Image (cartoon, helix red, strand yellow):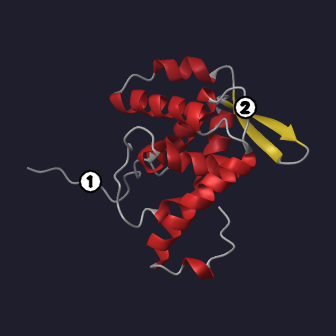
Amino acid sequence: MAETISAAAPALFNNALETGVRATILLNAAYPRAFDVTEIVWFDHLIVHTGDIGGPPSLHPDVPQRSGELLVRRRLVEDSLFVMRRLHLLEFVPDGDAGLLFRASEEAVGVIELMRTPYSIALRERAEWLACNVLSRSRSDLEHLIAERIGRWRIEFHGGDAASETNLHV
């Protein structure tokens, strides 16, 4: 008899725990740098879609309309950061200009090293690649990279009407 998945089952890769683990792995790879929520939203998308920016093959499928992932991700990322903070895996870093930034805590590395599934190993590899090739860029360079990518994603999502979407806030 075939098993069915309950409608109440949590969505993989789309809940606060999964997103928080990705953020923790990513921030640990970038340590000691700290980032704001907007940047972490960008990076959360890029860590599973590294193929989009010339990196290792993407972990998640290259499907059309995935622009929606980025557009609805901010609230989920915010929730995930606070979950990871409560677990002492992330810490707040106050910044006079940017407000509240997030950075991996000292406890994060020990937890991450315990993760040994093929997916978590691949995620760490992509986080390291991002830390070396993307996260080390200045804020303005990151904004330029994201603007280029969001432009293409926006075209996918809105059917080519990118010109009318001038104030996209992630």
Per the model, the C-alpha gap separating discs 2 and 1 is 40 Å
Q: Position of residue 75 (x, y in %)?
A: 62, 57
- Circle 2 residue: 33
Label 1 Cα neighbours within 10 Å, binned few <14 / some 14-19 / many ≥20: few
Any part of residue 112 in sight: yes
Label 2 Cα neighbours within 10 Å, binned few <14 / some 14-19 / many ≥20: some
- Circle 1 residue: 5
User: Is residue 118 shown left or right of residue 37?
Assistant: left
Q: Position of residue 99 (x, y in %)?
A: 84, 48
Q: Which residue is located at x 37 percent, y 48 percent?
A: 60
Name the amino acid type tagged 1: Ile
Q: Position of residue 125 (x, y in %)?
A: 45, 29
Q: Which of 1 and 154 is in front in this view?
A: 154
Reading the chain from its start, which is encountered first: label 2 or label 1?
Answer: 1
**Total marks drawn?**
2
Q: Which of 85 and 44 is in front in this view?
A: 44
Q: Where is residue 85 in the image (x, y as percent from the top left)?
A: 68, 35
Q: What element carries label 2?
A: loop
Name the amino acid type tagged 2: Arg
Mark linked to residue 56: none
Q: Which residue is located at x 77 percent, y 41 percent?
A: 101
What residue occupies the far left of the structure in this picture? 1
User: Is residue 163 shown left or right of residue 64?
Assistant: right
Q: Which residue is located at x 64 percent, y 46 percent?
A: 40
Q: Which residue is located at x 50 percent, y 65 percent?
A: 152
User: Is residue 31 shown left or right of residue 29?
Assistant: right
Kindly indicate whether the residue at mark 1 contacts the one at mark 2 (C-beta within 8 angstroms).
no
